[in-house]
Image (tube, coloured by chain):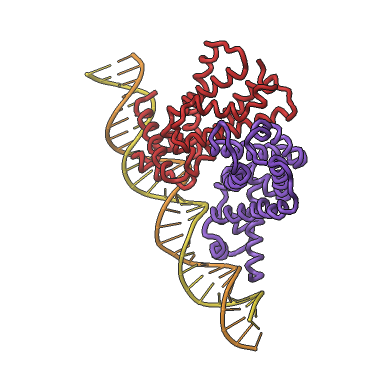
Chain colours: A purple, B red, C orange, D yellow
Amino acid sequence: MDRRQQKTRQAIFHAFSKLLETRRFENITVQEIIDAANIGRSTFYAHFETKDALLREMCTDIFRHVFEEHLTQEADHDYSTGEQRLLQRLEHILYHLRENQRNLTRLLCTESGELFMNFFKEYLYDMFTRYLDEFQGDVPRDYLLYYLVGGFAETVRWWVSKDMQPSPEEIAGYFMAVNETHNTREALPA
Amino acid sequence: MDRRQQKTRQAIFHAFSKLLETRRFENITVQEIIDAANIGRSTFYAHFETKDALLREMCTDIFRHVFEEHLTQEADHDYSTGEQRLLQRLEHILYHLRENQRNLTRLLCTESGELFMNFFKEYLYDMFTRYLDEFQGDVPRDYLLYYLVGGFAETVRWWVSKDMQPSPEEIAGYFMAVNETHNTREALPA
DNA sequence: TAAATAGCGAACAAAGTGTCTTATATCTAT
DNA sequence: ATAGATATAAGACACTTTGTTCGCTATTTA
């Protein structure tokens, strides 16, 4: 990839990220991003079709790291119970999230956060699906998935509201604690 | 209140509601609302300062009914356990939500839904706060609140995705089931 | 070093915003 | 029923934003 493209792309991401600190997504104009990134108008449109596309790519970038790198981690160890495996996985996700603390705080806590959360939830849904594939319980399986996704997403929001001060282990522990029931009983395969 | 105002207001709400069926909030223009409601431009601005204010008032309208009427209900009965009281309360909320099924489906399931959900969560947070005032557990109290709010909000989203076919009792039951642990143990005061 | 390509900057039409004014229609209270 | 109050219509307005296009320049890659 051309170095010029890389630089421009980074400049746009950076400018966008900084703007999100103070303003909500909907009220940020393409013009402002262009000015902040110090690029030409046509250059922006050469990179991104719309402002929405920019957000989408930014989210994808972040989440690819957060959720993907973990696949290797998983192969390394072999935990006895599903509960332990999930715990490890959640911790890793939280670690990666914290690496993106600056962006995350902006994306989650501004009013633009909802768009971001939707992306996040999609990834979470996939993940939990894989961890609950042998589930047989007294509530519908897809209901439990929705519920867990919502609970964990809100867990992260809470964490961010605490400036991510508690450790990922602590947070993951909290989440497992409030889910004791179906974790230990029947939700998670061994 | 002047009949003309009422009619105009309703026309705007109706038009807005219909537009939300197909498009996401951010992409709907004031002009479109004006055209759909068949009113004059200045008339819209006489009623609402911005598009955001319109959404806010619409949400407030809906939630006032959903959460408020319940206060009387509560006084009527006197349930022995906190768990039962919460169950009843959740059921009532779900009933009222279903009364607004048309609007809700649009607001929750379109991409505009996140804005709406934030309003919903604020109300939920207040409600759960009242039900957990004597809580003493192994996770921070406000964390549990966040978690429950997220879980219940997602529960409703799931319900809507099922066309609100399951009964409110069923839904409330599911929610209580996945929360068995802290409901029966220590979260809820008797 | 040459050919390809990314960026600049200006201009553009189109669409949307929010405000204001004047005239008309409709309400409410007497 | 009428008079005064007020909501609405309709149009104009300056302004902002958008997305596209063009010719020119600077940079990169092979």
Where does residue D3 sit, x and y in percent of width and height? 30, 21
Residue A158 falls left or right of residue A52: right
Compared with residue B97, is residue A165 higher up or lower down, i.e. above or below? below
Residue located 57% across and 45% down the image:
A118
- Total numbered labels: 0
The quarter of the picture where the N terminus of chain B appears is top left
Where does residue A74 sit, x and y in percent of width and height? 71, 51
Residue B6 falls left or right of residue A184: left
Name the image quarter holding residue B15: top left
- Of residues B5 and A108, the one drawn nearer to the viewer in this rendering: A108
Name the image quarter holding residue A186: top right
Residue located 54% across and 56% down the image:
A53
- Of residues A27 and A171, the one drawn nearer to the viewer in this rendering: A171
The quarter of the picture where the C terminus of chain B appears is top right
Compared with residue B35, is residue A52 higher up or lower down, i.e. above or below? below
Where does residue C22 sit, x and y in percent of width and height? 34, 39
Residue B63 falls left or right of residue A23: left
Residue located 63% across and 70% down the image:
A1
Name the image quarter holding residue A182: top right
Where does residue B142 sit, x and y in percent of width and height? 69, 29
Residue B161 visible in the picture = yes
Residue located 50% across and 22% down the image:
B92
Residue A120 visible in the picture = no
